[in-house]
Image (cartoon, rainbow, N blue to C red):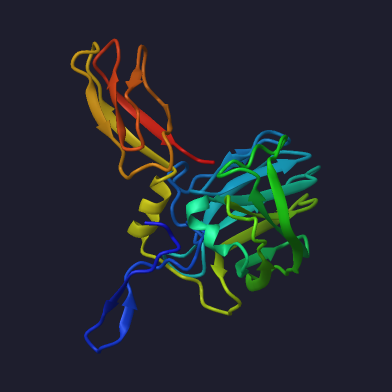
Amino acid sequence: MPLSSVALVRLADGSSGQVVGTKNRIINGAMAVDQRNAGASQTFTAAAASAYSVDRWYGYCTGANVTGQRVQGATVGQYRYQFTGAASVTGIGFGQRIEQLNSADLAGTTATLSVDLANSLLTTVTWTAYYANTADTFGTLASPTRTQIATGTFTVTSTVTRYRTQISVPATATTGVEIVFSVGAQTSGTWTIGDVQLERGIGNTPFERRSYGQELALCQRYYSTKTQQMVAGSSPAVPVTYKVTMRAIPTITGGGAGFTAANSTTEGFDGYQTSSNAQNLTFSSEM
């Protein structure tokens, strides 16, 4: 279901209630879903390609390597993402790409971006919004294929605080939107990000907290894993289905020697290999 759609039901008291929260175009803004690392620390390599961290979020750095990790927030079940600086670091970025189906209706409107931020060293966090030049194709850090919509800064402290800004989204921004937060020389200390929200309209609405199961399913449209028993030979092939329909036919990794994925769709594929083994497979249709 596109995030721009809203399902309502009539509650017992006669009021209308929202079944699935859909105002927030950011997926996993609460940083709760972390299929790749399960809360473990990861290293971002300086001047390398962006690397995915908690689901739907990528990070990058320049000058020197940094580490990033999902950390516990102020209450049980609340999470943040936190970078730890290092000597010689000149910049860190953290971003998410929102597919066309979930952002096209923002074109020609004003959107509100809100986020919880803290930094123990620096006092400025920059935000930048882009749209893809072609549908869901943003390019790479080295060769981006995107157009800047707007940029600005938040003046932050070492205490986690909520910040908001309005973004005038041009009518041409129908091909996908990208939100990037960045800092400069984080040579020590920590940078903390959480509860990111991008919504249509000018407002001061609370962060929309979807259930973990809903958020996980939204994330699995772009990345998921599965342990699958494979059989030797191509006849019969093993039909493998993804946990949810993927955004696009995914890149499949983790197959053993002679592994082949045939007849791939966004729903699944027919798999086989040269020996019978259980394979830990990953499926990615990130943008």
Residue 267 located left or right of residue 185: left
Give the residue displayed 22% in from the left and 19% down from the top. Answer: 237
Image quadrant in which the C terminus is located? top right
Give the residue displayed 23% in from the left and 12% down from the top. Answer: 232
Q: Residue 158 appears at what percent x and percent y?
A: 70, 68
Count of numbered tags? 0
Residue sitting nearer the eye, 222 or 39: 222
User: Is any atom of residue 126 visible in this view?
Assistant: no
Residue 135: name its quadrant: top right
Q: Residue 260 appears at what percent x and percent y?
A: 35, 17
63 is higher (above) or lower (below) than 170: above
Give the residue displayed 32% in from the left and 35% down from the top. Answer: 226
Looking at the image, the residue that sits furthest to the left is 236
Q: Residue 199 appears at what percent x and percent y?
A: 54, 68
Image quadrant in which the N terminus is located? bottom left
User: Is any atom of residue 32 visible in this view?
Assistant: yes
Q: Residue 129 appears at what percent x and percent y?
A: 68, 57
Give the residue displayed 49% in from the left and 61% down from the top. Answer: 30
Residue sitting nearer the eye, 69 or 145: 145
131 is higher (above) or lower (below) than 45: below
Residue 22: name its quadrant: bottom left
Residue 6: name its quadrant: bottom left
Residue sitting nearer the eye, 106 or 188: 106
Residue 135 located left or right of residue 273: right
Residue 201 located left or right of residue 79: right
Residue 100 located left or right of residue 273: right
